[in-house]
Amino acid sequence: MPEGPEIETERLHEAIQEEMEKEGGGFLKRIALSTAILAAFAAIAALKAGATVNESLLLKTESTRLQAQASDQWAYYQAKGLKAAVQEATAASWEAAGKPVPGRLREQSKRYAEEQAEIKKAAEEKERGAR
């Protein structure tokens, strides 16, 4: 009985390895190219997502600023209403005392009411901008 195979397998083994490397090399190149293309698409998608997030944050900040300004306008509106109410109460006390109401009280009350209407328009505009 022979100790080793009669066919020389070392050269056959080398030939098989060379063929595998030739065929496998093309396959590996296709896999690498596909991976690179997918990575490029993923990077582009990530950039677009980041830009969308930044735009969203900018709009939210602007909305918050406008809402704060609208809130300030409504507080100013209420202050003018209180001033008008004080002027009317003062005029009522003059009338209750049977004395003539000073003209400045009526004028100031009317002026506060007009200013209040303008302030209301500005506050509503700010609220629309915030939405």
Image: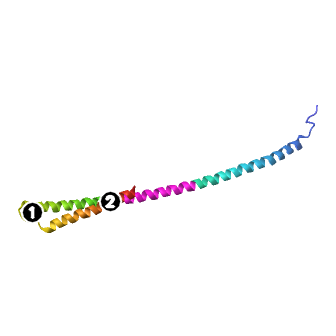
- Name the residue nearer the viewer: 66 or 3: 66
Residue shown at 57%/56% (left/top)? Answer: 47
Please tell me whether residue 98 is drawn above or below residue 28 in the rendered image.
below
Q: In the image, 97: left or right of 10?
A: left
Q: Decide which of tag 2 and tag 1 comes sooner along the chain.
A: 1
Q: Amino acid at mark 1?
A: Trp
Describe the element under mark 2 as helix, strand or loop.
Answer: helix
Residue shown at 10%/60% (left/top)? Answer: 93
Question: Where residue 16 sits in the image (x, y, percent)?
Answer: 84, 43
- Whole-number angstrom distance, CA of label 2 to CA of label 1: 34 Å
Question: Where residue 126 sits in the image (x, y, percent)?
Answer: 36, 60
Q: Amino acid at mark 2?
A: Ala
Q: Over which residues does the magenta segment extend?
A: 46-67
Residue shown at 29%/63% (left/top)? Answer: 118
Residue 72 seen in the figure: no
The residue to which callout 2 is attached is: 123
Give the residue furthest to the top: 1
The residue to which callout 1 is attached is: 94
Question: Where residue 4 sits in the image (x, y, percent)?
Answer: 91, 36
Give the residue furthest to the left: 98
Q: Assign the N terminus to one quadrant of the image.
A: top right
Q: In the image, 10: left or right of 86?
A: right
Q: Assign the C terminus to one quadrant of the image.
A: bottom left
